[in-house]
Amino acid sequence: MELTFLQKIVLLALDDKGWFGSAEHKIKFGLVGAILFELQKLERITITIDDVAVINPKSTENVVLDRVLNLIKSSKKPRSLRSWIQRIVFKKLLLRKTILKQLIHDKVIAREEYSLMMVFYQTKFPLVNVELKRKLQEEIYEKLVADKPLSDEDVMLLVVMNNCKMVRKNFGGFLQYLKLRGRINEITQFKKPKGEGDEMLRLLQTAISRAIMASNVSIHI
């Protein structure tokens, strides 16, 4: 089966036992950044560091994308890119939950309730389709260690993975992990942007990183 871009992100954020782990909090921000990336690629919005504006309110036929598009469309004042990422996360639009339901429906993952001392309950999403996730990991790994050309979607996926602590959990056991780790760091620093696509990705990288840092500060105050 073919996963959507957003499904790939959520699947890679989970470990094989079904836990988000250190990505639990951060993935919310990475996922919103990826949604804004998708909306921009579909020419529904424009993105600058100071503003996110709707240029085409037509439905994308994707329930997750449309929830975010409609929220931006209903705004009565301009907001910076980082502010929009934070606002969408805290609006609780059930973005991640909807994608998890899609993956469960397609039998990629399962849903289990885990209890500790019959007091604390947590939900985990163990991997069902192991082969599908391994194939996805191997495709990413091969592109990076062989220095193959990357699409904007590939780079956006790396931006999310790097910001949301998803690299080691997916590639820590691969033979050339250190080379891959260094390549991801190099790519996501955007020291040599190659046009408008890279500039937009650089803006999203910065905004996601700063939104996560701001949320970490607010959590501990």
Image: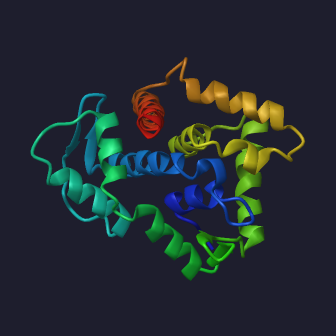
Most distant residue in the right direction: 175
Work out which quarter of the rendered image holds the C terminus and state it.
top left
Q: Which percent across, then down, holds residue 104?
A: 58, 78
Which residue sits at x=34%, y=59%? 92
Judged left or right of residue 76, residue 5 is right
Q: Is residue 53 above or below residue 179?
A: below
* Left or right of residue 209, residue 15 in this image: right
Question: Which residue corresponds to the image point at 76% horizontal and 35% vertical from the top-left?
Answer: 180
Please tell me which residue is depicted at 21% across the width and 59% down the height of the picture. Answer: 70
Instruction: Pick out the residue farthest to the top.
Output: 191
Report whether 18 appears left or right of 178.
left
Does the image show residue 216? Answer: yes
Q: Residue furthest left?
A: 76
- What coloring was used for the rendering? rainbow
Check the image and report above or below for 162 versus 38. Answer: above
| Residue 81 at x, y percent in the picture | 31, 35
- In percent of width and height, residue 200 lies at 40, 33
Q: Quadrant of the N terminus?
A: bottom right
Image quadrant assignment for residue 195: top left
Which residue does the image show at 34% across and 43% down from the upper left?
A: 86
Q: How many numbered marks does the figure carry? A: 0
The foreground one among 11 and 126 is 126
Q: 116 and 23: which one is in front?
A: 116
Above/below status of 45 relative to 91 = above
- Residue 217, percent from left and from top: 45, 32
Q: Is residue 146 visible?
A: no
Compare residues 37 and 28 and report the one nearer the observer: 28
Q: Tell me the quarter of the picture where residue 143 sits.
A: top right
